Amino acid sequence: MRASPFACALVVVAFGTGCVPEFDDDTSRVAAPRVLAIRADPAEVRERLDKTATFTALVAAPDGSATPEVFWSLCIDRKPLSELGPVSPKCIASPEPGPSIAEPLGTGTSIEATIPETACQLFGPQRPDPKPGEPSGRPVDPDPTGGYYQPVMAWLGTTAVLGSVRLGCPLRDIEFNQRYRQNENPALDALEAVRGDGTALPLDDGGSLDLSPGERVTVRTTWPLCPAVDECGDGICGPDEDQTTCQGTGDDCAAPRGCTGAERYVFFDALAQSTSERWEALTVSYYATDGSFDNPRTGGTATAGAEGQPGTNNGYVAPSAGTAALWVIVRDDRGGTAWRSFNVNVSP
């Protein structure tokens, strides 16, 4: 399962830069303030229709640690195609590299950004305007899901984490443009801890879980089952539905909404010049201030599993004493993100 190329933590210290390919490759232990994830609402913006997106950072810190304020900037500098990194190096040179490179957005956990009208030229499939004295460039290559992304940076001091919003750029294919639907952020239907005796304890966002020292539990994450066949009236606007086909029967596409599980989506194969359907892959990442997970990341299913709903499991061992904060983050491979957090209280 391949993550979006923008699921990338960019560490900037002094004048040096380095890139960790995915958020999930980093350690699961939260020992200092960190941005663990960035969510865009909506998860995908349509060219010239969706003017803004709201970006939210999940900032984690050990108990009692001072958390620096998040500063945001929107990258508007097109990365040279010869550059191997996921974003223009100029955008991560400093929090404010200049107005022609990155637009400062302000500070806070969440920020609203205006998406440039030229985003599909800068970062998408449309040929960019040539610079003075230079030949016209070629379009950006899509990611494995056929997607393109507008990059945004969340800065904690001199450390930047790269986020993005998927760009809904039309292609020169009528079938794709008619059937493609915007990505929807995933959602966690349920999060629970299953004890050794089989008892399942629901984990509400911001809630707490009481465990014994060193107790082992299974953290179970589930999400909605997305339909394999479009059906008017189910509340989801699928590839083979539109306002005409579903008019008067639920009107699923009057205000289009996608499925919040592993979605079925339309993919255009540029090499074969053909359109097909694919399913999203979902992955779950785990972080904690104390205790340990079996795996820093697990893959999820698009179909119903043994528990009757798509999801994934991971083992967690509680610390010997004290409290711990835990975060569970689910991502789809088209750039969507969701999360929950809870606390563990350890007592004999």
Image (cartoon, grey):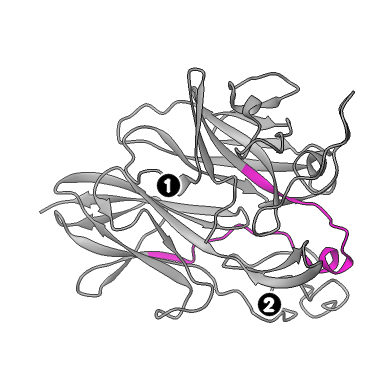
On the image, the x and y values in percent for residue 187 come to: 54, 61
Residue at horizontal 74%, vertical 34%?
78
Q: Which residue is mark 2?
A: 234
In the shown orientation, is residue 72 left or right of residue 12?
right
Q: Position of residue 31 (x, y in %)?
A: 31, 35
Left or right placement of residue 326 versus residue 238 in this view: left
Q: Residues within 10 Å of mark 1 (few under 14, many from 20)?
A: few
> Toward which corner of the image does residue 232 lie, by quadrant?
bottom right
Q: Position of residue 196 (x, y in %)?
A: 20, 70
Given residues 45 and 278, the one toward you in this image is 278
Type of the residue with mark 2: Asp
Residue drawn 65% across the image and 48% down it: 41
Q: Is residue 204 above or below residue 85?
A: below
Residue 184 placed where, x, y %?
65, 59
Magenta-colored stretch includes residue 344: no
Which quadrant does the C terminus fall into? bottom left
The residues colored magenta run 164-191
Residue 280 position (above or below residue 112): below
Q: Is residue 73 above or below residue 239?
A: above
At mark 1, the secondary structure is helix
Residue 113 visible? The answer is yes
- Residue 25 has which mark? 1
- Hey, which quadrant is residue 98 in on the image? top right
Q: Nearer the viewer, residue 192 or 89?
A: 89
User: Label 2: how many residues lie within 10 Å, few (<14), some (14-19) or many (20+)?
Assistant: few
**Which amino acid type is marked by label 1?**
Asp
Q: Report the residue at 79% width, 80% height from top.
A: 249
Q: Which circle's residue, 2 or 1, is located before the other in the chain?
A: 1
Residue at disc 2, secondary structure: loop
What is the CA distance from the residue labelled 2 to the residue labelled 1? 37 Å
Q: Residue 185 in magenta?
A: yes
